[in-house]
Image (spheres, rainbow, N blue to C red):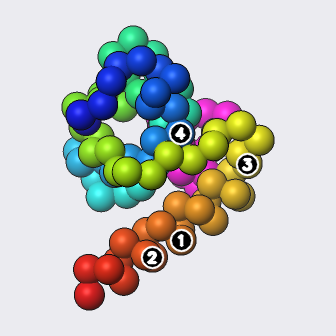
Amino acid sequence: MNCPQDERSILGTVVIATAGRDAGRMFVIVGTQGKDALIADGKTRKLEKPKRKNIKHLKATNTVLQTEDLTDKGLRKKLSAMQEENTTNRL
């Protein structure tokens, strides 16, 4: 992922997993832990229990979401809309 390592600058960034069982799925960075990012999608990975993922295995998008006052339901809705938009643009 080509972005600064400063936690505040990457919080809320929408990313696509490029490796592992979640490859191709969209997530939001909700925190960092060392060299890893904590990612959530609101469905399989809730905001209360985010997944720890190596930053090398994430591809950043140009979208940043406000993580304050974000709920799992709201996150699912936003990511679903973005995924649908991304799929529509490919056709």
Furthest toward the right, the residue is 69
Q: CA distance from mark 2 to mark 3?
A: 20 Å
Q: Amino acid at mark 3?
A: Thr
Q: Residue at x 63, y 43 (%)?
A: 66
Q: Quadrant of residue 1?
A: top left
Magenta segment range? 39-52
Verify CB contact (< 8 Å) between mark 3 and mark 4.
Answer: no
Q: Quadrant of residue 91?
A: bottom left
Question: What is the number of the mark on residue 81?
Answer: 1
Question: What is the number of the mark on residue 84?
Answer: 2
Residue under label 4: 12
Q: Secondary structure at mark 2?
A: helix
Residue under label 3: 71
Query: Between 14 and 17, which is closer to the camera in this rendering?
Result: 14
Q: Magenta-highlighted stretch: main secondary structure? A: loop
Q: Amino acid at mark 4?
A: Gly
Q: Earlier in the sequence, mark 4 or mark 1?
A: 4
* Nearer to us: label 2 or label 4: 4
Q: Secondary structure at mark 3?
A: loop
Give the answer, above or below, for where 79 lies relative to 63: below
User: Magenta segment: does it hold 89?
Assistant: no
Q: Amino acid at mark 1?
A: Ala
Q: CA distance from mark 1 to mark 2?
A: 5 Å
